[in-house]
Amino acid sequence: MNIYDELKWRGLVNQVSDEDKVREYLATPGRVMYCGFDPTAESLHVGNLVPLLCLARMRRAGHKPLFLLGGATGLIGDPSGKDKEREFSNQERIFAQADKIAAQADDFFRKTTGLPAEVVNNYDWTRDLTAIELLREVGKHFTINWMLAKDSVKNRIVREDSGISYTEFSYMILQGYDFYRLSVDRDCRLQIGGSDQWGNITAGCELIRRKGGNEAFALTFPLITTASGKKFGKSEKGAIFLSPEKTSPYAFYQFWINTDDSDVIRFLMYFTFLKLEDIQSLERELAEAPHLRVAQRRLAEETTRMIHGQAELDKVLAATAALFGKDADLRDLDADTLAAALESAPTKAYPASDLPDLPQILVDLGLCPSKGQARKDFAAGAVSVNGQRLSDPAYMPVAGDFIGGQLMVLRKGKKNYGVVRQQA
């Protein structure tokens, strides 16, 4: 199947400059295309997954996708989708973030395609570009009238409270120049991106036509929202990042498994490599037994494995099964994954040399109103330590009770957890 047709059935084609010519372009293996990512944070997030996955799909289809880092454009600020000016970040910070994102992209490509990412940085061809060269060689080919008609500019101009600076107004010229340089240097004739990038991408197509008389193409993805209209990629705690340092694999998995029934089939198309027949099978299971959440579990497993690998997924699944199972032993679980799973549980830290008895710990954690009630709960078999029921309220915790030397998990009843940490 032509990769363009796959993007179509997955619902990933929003705008395309010339559908027949783009399909024809992608019919021959070895075609070059690119997508740009400005390093505005230390990590990519799930909102970047659609374009990132599209580049990987292109690679798997035999093409030569380029991952463009916006080392230069990241210093300027893209006005697309913004209602006010970005605050400038210093160059050192942008470059450091770019290095982290490049490594992240490379890891993603190796996991999904078995090959390294081909990363290019627009700072490489922009840093020596003088103001006069930019105005004569690039700016000459853009009319103000044409630029004012672009939504990214028009939406800001009508806002009297913010407007748009000349700096951000010029962003599309720089992005257009990126496309032109890649068309000349790498024979790249297709740029892909989010729907908010349509104006910037077509600016590049126009520059390529005006400067060299060549044809280039634009393709954008739809804006991803939930069925309720909520912007995709946010949780109650904010953005969901691909970096495990910013979003734990457990929290990443939970984000996907909490997908609403009305969104899950669409998200399986957008965010996985599953074939159409597999997704259709999951859709039938969803219709027949939605309470089993088979589609959500498959979505969460596929995305977590894709980003964090099978070993991390195994840890997440083990922690999930143990925490929601009956009297499961927690002592062999990964301490970091367990801590992430119990992030919202009450936590108390004590010096290792001064651990109180368990009834006092239950009171300190707020799981029992008094030590007397805690003793009754022990006698009733309602208290467990690391998944094992205890009936002796006089039991004193020892070093071996701390999983990975870090934490001990108490549970009262079926759902009330508390975490104990020992201090050095």
Image (cartoon, rainbow, N blue to C red):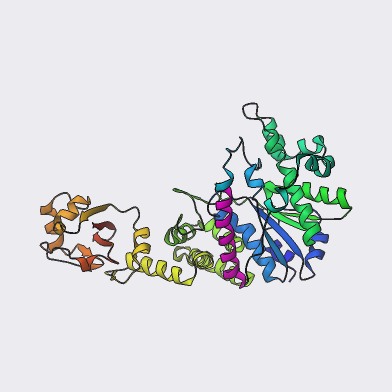
Whether residue 349 sits left or right of residue 2 in the image: it is left
- Residue 68 image-quadrant placement: bottom right
- What residue do we see at 57% from left, 60% from top? 267
Q: Is residue 311 above or below residue 246?
A: below
Residue 120 belongs to magenta span: no
Q: Is residue 97 magenta?
A: yes
Percent coordinates x, y for residue 305 in the rendering: 51, 68
Prevalent SS, magenta region:
helix
In which quadrant will I find the N terminus?
bottom right
Q: Residue placed farthest to the top in the image?
A: 160
The outermost residue toward the right is 213
Image quarter of the C terminus? bottom left
Relative to residue 139, is residue 316 depicted above or below? below
Residue 416: % across, % down: 27, 56
Residue 189 visible in this rendered orientation of the protein: no
Q: Residue drawn at (45%, 66%), measured in percent from left and top? A: 292
Q: Nearer the viewer, residue 255 or 376?
A: 255
The answer to whether 205 appears left or right of 47 in the picture is right
Q: Nearer the viewer, residue 260 or 274?
A: 274
Q: Is residue 391 visible?
A: yes
Residue in the picture at 80% in, 35% down:
144
The boundaries of the magenta stretch are 94-114
Percent position (x, y) of residue 373? 13, 54
The picture places residue 338, in percent across and down from the top left corner, at 34, 63
